[in-house]
Image (tube, rainbow, N blue to C red):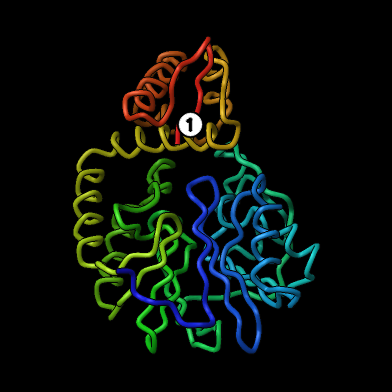
Amino acid sequence: MTEPLPATMQVFERGWLSSNNILFTGTQTALVDSGYLTHAPQTLALVQHALQGRPLDLLVNTHLHSDHCGGNALLQQHYDCRTVIPASEAGKVRDWDEDALSFIATGQQCARFGFDATLSAGQTIRLGDMDWQALGAPGHDPHSLILYCPAERLLISADALWENGFGVIFPELDGESGFAEARATLELIATLDVRLVIPGHGAPFADIGKALATAFSRLDYLAADPVRNAQNAIKVLLKFLLLERQQLALDQVAIVLGGMPLVQESNRRFLQLPMEELAQWAMAQLVRVGAAQVQARLLVNRD
């Protein structure tokens, strides 16, 4: 049985194209993370239904990957809500540098949004009439924050910890350090007294010890041979594209992958395959695990 949430807190479990959204009520209303751009109308509908006419006062992003902030613009337009982002991302958002924000590198979409305030590791934010500590969680993303409520022993872990792993270690794909930071983040989480984790993707879970053991094992596996991290990233990026578009012509997959700077760089650093060969490999991997199927010259998403 899943541990209960406080009455002022609700989780919208969204799947993988959109991150989970956490809605808070109480003295003020707030939403943590807003999902992907193409799901923004659905995000708005979920929030409207849950708030039953109340305004959304505050929007908070754990990090600014497209699947966590893609609904920001629509929510801001509808509610004129105050928006809080990680402090280290402020300049990129102010200048709307889509390259620095990773949207161009990953071939993903995000409508332009603004912000009203920033949040840094070590600060506290009040959500659902509870105090949440912002903790730095680099690894998957150098600028990511996680949120911990000591009074309720709750952790909003974003993509730093899932029940069966964590998000792609993106910095390593560009030649930056990421494995060591991911390990430090997991070690930090291990020091917290947590009864329930609300991850960026997947259902909330209570067995944090098992999740951490899985994550450390996964990290050891990837760090032992960085090629594995690159291969995983390319598979994830192709799957994300399939989740967004639902199908791709087989003869377009190499073109689409080749148009993603992050795939180009990962291939250059680690795999060094012709793009057609890389595309065939990535498609075969998704088909092998049941994440896609080939139908009439199309690569079709499977959930």
Label 1 CA crowd tier, 10 Å (few <14, some 14–19, many 20+)? many
Give residue 65's position: percent from left, percent from top: 55, 52
293 to 138, vertically: above or below = above
Q: Is residue 53 left or right of residue 30?
A: right
- Which sits in the foreground, 110 or 292? 292
Quarter occupied by residue 108: top right
Helix, strand or loop status at disc 1: helix
Residue kind at label 1, given as amino acid type = Leu
Position of residue 279 relative to residue 6, above or below, is above
| Residue 17 horizontal/vertical position (percent) | 53, 45
User: Which quadrant is the N terminus positioned in?
Assistant: bottom left
Q: Residue at x 61, y 57 (%)?
A: 69
Give the answer, above or below, for where 112 lies relative to 138: above
| Lateral position of residue 81 relative to residue 22, left or right | right
Q: Which residue is mark 1?
A: 238
Residue drawn 71% across the image and 78% down it: 57
- The answer to whether residue 219 is above or below residue 118 is above
Q: Residue 296: x and y, percent? A: 52, 10
Please identify the quadrant where the C terminus is shown: top left
Q: How many marks?
A: 1
Residue 55 falls left or right of residue 193: right
Q: At 61% across and 60% down in the image, what residue appears?
A: 34
Q: Toward the viewer: 30 or 191?
A: 30
Left or right: 239 in relation to 99: left
Q: Position of residue 111 (x, y in %)?
A: 72, 50
